[in-house]
């Protein structure tokens, strides 16, 4: 197959790996990421455009990859495909402290942008555990969320402008760095969340916000999500506090984590039906802790708080956060456990969790899901307490329980991980048919040769 | 012409006005709004879909109208067109205080939503002077902005989900009421800011936020925008204050308003090069005023503040706000003065204003523009101090001065009023050509018969 020599001739300055080289490298979060016959790492947007034109001319399909931390198989590749690795486009081109915007190349990691912004007392307003590897381009392409989305929005809301290489090699350039623009269809939103199926994002203007001086942490036991929501609403309603996190853990998950991490909470009611990890920002740590304590005291009865503790040291706060964030413990307990990522409207959380617990038990009496997530935006992560992968039929049945009625209620079967390969079938079953028709037509319009990440999202 | 009888037969429950009736009614902010041969006001989304199908079948084009407060001619009509008036769809279907979302029909006014949300201590997070007439559907269609956008985003960022009737009469239904959804292309963004050229928005899920307990106001004189930005940055950087407004007035505008309103400021430096109207929210008015005073004192020297005053009464605050908001005084002084609406990146504001003042003076030595707007997001409104309309050639020359280099710098020639008819030529000249090509292709894909608001935005 003459693909590699042709690629090397067409892209003399790019780094190129063949299948053998790929096989010897770490493919990231998904073993299928390096199934392609070649990886090309252009040095700049011109190189990306040249690669796209090469692939379009040769009828080879192209899969863009950033940090390879995706959880839905959106970057999986097969032997007939070429990877466009954005690892050569890592420049932070500008941090503008007045406009509060950062201009970065797509391969920049979230961590690198956070660091550069912090030098100006700013932050990108989005954070997630994979910050050291996840790239801005990848986060744009999956519309990443994380723990601060309830306040700052998802990646879509942090993008002021972007540049993308279209499937025909042209460059769509909308590097707006202002919030307000009503200058025709805002087509950058087509590329945000498209998982590389409509073009390859090469440069992004990201909105930045001032960092809080200090952030205090509390762990609180409550009887249900409604109680936890009363706490959240109390802090959101106060202008003097800046709620920075509100993560909820249902009992099964909290118990697993407590055992796995050997967490010794003292008097804390870790056996409460729900635990809430709260973050509150203020100008100083003393103020933040005081506000957390006062706020919890004020809402104690109304929220039915069982017990709660404001961390008095960084180490204590870190231990509380590990209880929420070391989700790899699920993988240790149940390798490849079937896992899901839904958004449930705020008012329906308790009813939803009760319904799926019963529905899953009806499928298998041993099923008792681990449920945790981002309370203030209703994004729940759900893992089944069994080893995976389960059969296709069983997976479908679980999805049936989890996704039933979710769209009609205003929720989403895919909150922040994207559709990729994993949720292709769910997309066909649960997305609005008119929306799917329109999405397909737009894919065919923009990528008639199906060059860009075929088989993902829209098929 | 048998159009009206056919319409009445096809839409028996809709209110229908003929051209004579239209001529006797108030057309709103633009005299051209009622140039159509008929206005149809369906009672529900089914009626809107029936009207759309009727128009598609009869080859009649359709212009959606909400509050008719648009400033760019997006709702202008001609005798061969029919108006789809959303005034029959005004229900506030739900306010969900837990999910913090309101579900409203498109014809609901902003004011009505604000009132319904306030009953739950919530607000839609967007505000503008036309709140009593402007509708949510219209605000979605123009991606409206206003004074709180720097903090809460524009209308695009407030929309969680929407329903729209497509040009073929099908209903696109994405009434998501959660923030996080990464479930395929987020096509609702095509309809946001499309000014009714791709479909008619019929229902919207709007994000709501808790209202601040009280808001204090200050008027501050500074030597330049950079100084004003230091003040903004100071308040944004504090977690204990919630900056709710930061409006800037350059001297020419401030002088005009001061004269027109007979504003007696006491010792205030109304002749400062720039005035800043600040709003700061806190749990109580006393706290808010104290924070404004302390914050201004802390940044006084660094920002080069010339003088400043925190309003000590509601009446004093209202007088300060009138200085910024009674922009109708420009119209009184210079009927139909050429007016513009640009976004300028934060770091470039002073240089931009200096450049356009010089450029306009070169066109006409008497030109001294009125410049004011939303400091914290860089959205400036600019009116020329002459009666309008000016000749087409002169208008072009003024646009040339105002828009030159703006896109390249990351700004926008159209910030929050939309493109409509008024900025069609500017769009052709100043929008990215690849973006324009793609927008045109999408318009042809979704509306091949050019039924929806032809001649606007994309042509």
Image (tube, coloured by chain):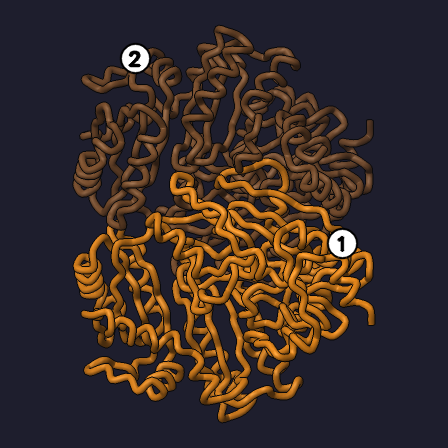
Chain colours: A orange, B brown
Q: Residue at x 62, y 52 (%)?
A: A44
Name the outermost residue toward the top. B365
The answer to whether residue B91 shows anywhere in this view is no
The residue at which mark 2 appears reads as: B262
| Residue B23, percent from left and from top | 64, 20
The residue at which mark 1 appears reads as: A53
The answer to whether residue A258 shows anywhere in this view is yes
Circle 1 — which element? Answer: helix
| Residue A440, percent from left and from top | 73, 58
**Foreground pick, A242 / A378:** A242
In-image side of A42 versus B112 (left or right)? right
In-image side of B33 versus B293 (left or right)? right
Q: Residue at x 44, y 15 (%)?
A: B330
**Foreground pick, B421 / A364:** B421
Q: CA distance from mark 1 to mark 2?
A: 64 Å
Q: Quadrant of the C terminus of chain A?
A: bottom right
Q: Looking at the rendering, which quadrant does residue B96 occupy?
A: bottom left
Which is more foreground, mark 1 or mark 2?
Answer: 1
- Tell me if residue B189 comes above or below residue B111 in the rendering: below
- Tell me if residue A195 comes above or below residue B151 in the rendering: below
Circle 2 — which element? Answer: loop
Q: Do the residues indicated by labels 1 and 2 lie within the same chain of the protein?
A: no
């Amino acid at each position: 197959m003459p693909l590699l020599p042709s690629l090397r001739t067409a892209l003399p300055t790019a780094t190129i790996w063949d299948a053998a080289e790929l096989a010897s490298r770490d493919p990231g979060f998904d073993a299928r990421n390096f199934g392609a016959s070649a990886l090309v790492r252009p040095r700049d947007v011109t190189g990306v455009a040249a690669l796209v034109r090469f692939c379009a001319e040769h009828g080879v399909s192209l899969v863009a990859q950033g940090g390879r931390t995706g959880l839905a198989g959106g970057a999986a590749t097969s032997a007939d495909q070429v990877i466009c690795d954005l690892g050569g486009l890592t420049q932070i081109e500008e941090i503008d402290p007045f406009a509060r915007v950062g201009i970065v190349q797509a391969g920049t990691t979230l961590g690198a942008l956070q660091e550069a912004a912090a030098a100006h007392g700013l932050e990108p307003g989005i954070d997630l555990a994979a910050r050291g590897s996840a790239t801005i381009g990848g986060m744009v392409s999956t519309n990443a969320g994380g723990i601060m989305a309830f306040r700052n929005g998802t990646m879509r809301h942090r993008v002021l402008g972007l540049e993308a290489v279209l499937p025909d090699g042209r460059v769509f350039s909308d590097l707006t760095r202002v919030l307000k623009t009503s200058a025709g269809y805002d087509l950058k939103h087509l590329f945000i969340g498209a998982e590389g199926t409509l073009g390859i994002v090469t440069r992004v203007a990201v909105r930045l916000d001032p960092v809080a001086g200090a952030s205090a942490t509390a762990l609180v036991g409550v009887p249900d999500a409604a109680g936890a929501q009363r706490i959240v609403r109390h802090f959101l309603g106060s202008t003097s506090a800046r709620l920075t996190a509100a993560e909820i853990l249902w009992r099964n998950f909290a118990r697993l984590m407590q055992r796995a991490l050997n967490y010794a909470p003292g008097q804390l009611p870790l056996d409460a039906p729900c635990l809430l990890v709260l973050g509150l920002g203020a100008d100083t740590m003393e103020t933040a802790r005081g506000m957390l304590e006062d706020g919890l005291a004020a809402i104690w009865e109304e929220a039915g708080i069982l017990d709660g503790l404001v961390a008095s040291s960084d180490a204590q706060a870190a231990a509380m956060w590990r209880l929420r964030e070391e989700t790899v413990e699920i993988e240790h307990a149940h390798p490849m456990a079937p896992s899901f990522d839904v958004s449930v409207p705020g008012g329906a959380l308790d009813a939803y969790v009760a319904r799926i617990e019963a529905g899953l038990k009806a499928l298998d009496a041993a099923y008792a899901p681990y449920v945790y997530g981002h309370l203030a935006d209703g994004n729940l992560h759900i893992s089944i307490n069994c080893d995976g992968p389960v059969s296709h039929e069983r997976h479908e049945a679980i999805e049936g329980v989890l996704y039933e009625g979710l769209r009609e209620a205003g929720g989403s079967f895919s909150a922040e991980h994207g559709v990729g390969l994993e949720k292709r079938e769910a997309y066909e079953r649960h997305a609005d048919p008119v929306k799917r028709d329109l999405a397909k037509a737009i894919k065919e319009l923009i990528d008639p040769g199906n060059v860009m990440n075929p088989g993902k999202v829209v098929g």
